[in-house]
Image: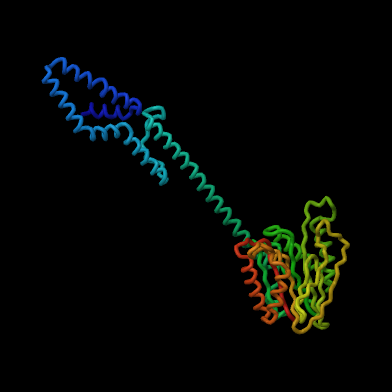
Amino acid sequence: MNTMMSLSGTVQNLSVERKLTLVLLVIMVLMPLAVFIVLQSGGAGQATNVLIGLIVASIILLVPFAKWMSHVLALRAIRELNDQCQRLKEGKYEGIDLPKGSDEGHDFQKLKWNMHWMGYTIATREIRLRRAMADLSQAQRQIGESLGYASLIQTSFLPRREDLFDYISDHFLIWEQRDVVGGDAYWFRPTRNGFLLGVIDCTGHGVPGAFMTLIVTSLLQKATEDTESPALVLARMNGLIKDALHQNGRDARSDDGMDCALCHVDRGKGCLTFAGANTPLYVLGGDGVEIVKGDRCGLGYVRSSKNFEFTEHDVEVGEGKRFYLASDGLVDQVGGERGFPFGRTRLMEFIDRERTSPIAAQGIDLAEELRRYQGEERRRDDITIIGFEL
């Protein structure tokens, strides 16, 4: 019995080519030789009986013998390989019996060996990938927490909504950063007879833009210490940003700044004074929506003249009038069926169409109008718009 098991194991370890050679040797050499010997040693009757017996035995044993031979030659090894492939598919890289070396055994065993080490390599890289993903997830979580805290810091530099309501009871505010933090801000400061109100659009988005908003909101306190003139404030801000960022010459290492729409409301005179740096004022009156353009000069940039004088525009404050300060993120947002920007024309048409709505409701409707227009398009810029009536 042990001899038969040893012989079977030896046959299993043979290559497919050697197994076929052995089978052909038995069928084409040994069996005819045995028949020939029987025929020579016995009579014709005995030879006939032997041939008939062989034919009958061959017919009876053909199917079992074919199955056994296919199992011996290939099917067993193929099933083992399929089982190994299934284990690799399920991520089970251990528990596979291997030959002692990659050069031992037949072709299927070599293939099994190679597949095992292929699975081992995949498993090793998968472990490394999991570790890298875990490190990346932790880093992303830390960055997210840092950005969340940075957002709180940026928000703390903005005017409190309570202060806005104290001085401007009828208003709406849309302040939506493209990222967690961004480069848009709004600014408010009470004055002797009214208040200063501005919308700021700094260079960049995200963290760089947020840093710029912190810088300019701090500089605005200095620029408005002894004046209520929007034009003078913008001129001072132009110089202060240049000095703070060392952007007074062509050899400057940065070229950052801001655009701004700034107005002063004097309640005693019933007048609004506006000055803008690349940003307009929208005025809704009885004849529709009018644009009061700002000057074509940004604040603090290397190319901006430090001696630039900004223009002031006086607008009478009357019943039924509404005023809107907006960064360019709203009008530049693409969307619609053709992917065009929202545009000033569409904004003005919306303002005129919604003139009878309460100002707070108009802000809600404008935010919804923008979301509808944007559709599946990504947000391109930070958006800030303040609308108010006096």
For the point 36% across and 29% down, which residue is it?
A: 106
Image quarter (top left, top right, bottom left or bottom right) of the N terminus: top left
Image quarter (top left, top right, bottom left or bottom right) of the C terminus: bottom right
Specify whether residue 192 is in view: no
User: Which is nearer the eye, 97 or 87?
Assistant: 87
- Residue furthest bottom in the image: 319
For the point 73% across and 65% down, which residue is it?
A: 328
* Left-right relation of 229 to 24: right
Q: Picture coordinates of residue 41 (x, y %)?
A: 14, 15
| Residue 298 higher or lower than 14, as above or below | below
The image quadrant that residue 91 belongs to is top left
- Residue furthest top in the image: 40
Q: Picture coordinates of residue 101 (x, y %)?
A: 40, 29
User: Which is nearer the eye, 139 or 77?
Assistant: 77
Please give the count of numbered marks on the rendered protein.
0
Q: Picture coordinates of residue 306 (x, y %)?
A: 86, 60
* Left-right relation of 239 to 363: right
The image quadrant that residue 216 belongs to is bottom right
Q: Picture coordinates of residue 141 (x, y %)?
A: 57, 56
For the point 80% across and 62% down, which residue is it?
A: 298
User: Which is nearer the eye, 332 or 13?
Assistant: 332
For the point 60% across and 58% down, which residue is it?
A: 144
